[in-house]
Image: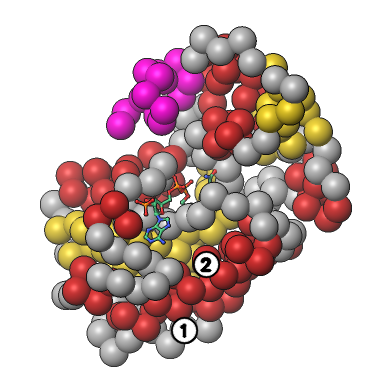
Amino acid sequence: MRIAVAGGTGTVGHHVVDQATRAGHEVVALARSNGVDLTTGDGLRAAIEGADAIIDVASAQTLSARASRDFFGSVTENLLAAARGADVHHVALSIVGAAAAPHGYYAGKLVQEQRVAASAGHWSILRATQFHEFAAQVLAQAKILGAHLVPRMRSQPVAASEVAAALVQIVESGAHGDEPDLAGPREERMADLSRSYLRRTGSADRVLEVRLPGALGAAMAKGGLLPGSDARLGSQTFAQWLDQYRGTGGADDR
Ligand SMILES: NC(=O)c1ccc[n+]([C@@H]2O[C@H](COP(=O)([O-])OP(=O)(O)OC[C@H]3O[C@@H](n4cnc5c(N)ncnc54)[C@H](OP(=O)(O)O)[C@@H]3O)[C@@H](O)[C@H]2O)c1
């Protein structure tokens, strides 16, 4: 199959590209670094020409609800419009619990889910919990007086490589609609994971766990982003992922 991966250079995107390529598919990664801007649509039509499926794993680094809505709204519209009329399976990756806590970054995920589900063609939505890499991503967000601010957050993180495998499997099976949620094997506390990550990378930086204000903070702290009992569970724990980490800024198996 010909598969276009929106955000194919990102944390989960590079796993999707690697795994789909290894499975024998013809894969194109859509990213600004490859000459495709998904928010403006520049370069998009030519890049997805002949695609059987689009896997959307693009993302923006923002905590602003407005910026997130703008990003996911325009990316989703542009991808759906570019493929309109062709028989393209649109597969979107969202986040477990985002629709029930549509604040900050998650506001954009709700917009994305709604636009995909309202589209006329074949679509699938997979919702995953935080990736193991999230413990590092969150460290880049806020630092005060030498300490990283990490939200009080109950999470059941999953390996990005296992999420990628599930996305490729959805495309190959032709399944569509809402997929069962995908989570990692055990619940963790995000501040503990960020501290472990810093230790593993030789950093002496401190982590300060803070409860984020408002409904988003409440959802994170109370477990609103945890999977339900019907979720599929991946097998790699955060500790196993960290054991293999090679200090390249991403997962070991890049
Ligand atoms: N991180 C998590 O823990 C987690 C958990 C569950 C679900 N998700 C979802 O998984 C998806 C991927 O997240 P991620 O953490 O893997 O993202 P990421 O590492 O931040 O990667 C983002 C990707 O999007 C591309 N991109 C950003 N803006 C673009 C633009 N204007 N035009 C074209 N490409 C653009 C980036 O490439 P360029 O910069 O080269 O353009 C990059 O390939 C998101 O939908 C996210 O909500 C994430």
Q: Position of residue 137 (x, y in %)?
A: 55, 36
Reply above or below: 240 against 133: above
Count numbered badges in the picture: 2
Magenta stretch, residue numbers = 240-254
Q: Which residue is mark 2?
A: 72
Q: Closest to the observer: 213 or 35?
A: 35
Mark 2 secondary-structure assignment:
helix
Q: Position of residue 78 (x, y in %)?
A: 40, 77
In the image, taking residue 84 as reference, residue 200 lies left or right, namely right
Answer with mark 2 or mark 1, whichever residue precedes in sequence. 2
Amino acid type for the residue under numbered disc 1: Ser
Mark 1 secondary-structure assignment:
loop
Question: Comparing marks 2 and 1, which lies closer to the viewer?
Answer: 2
Residue sitting at x 55%, y 30%:
136
Residue 243 inside the magenta-drawn segment: yes
Reply above or below: 243 against 238: above
Label for residue 119?
Answer: 1
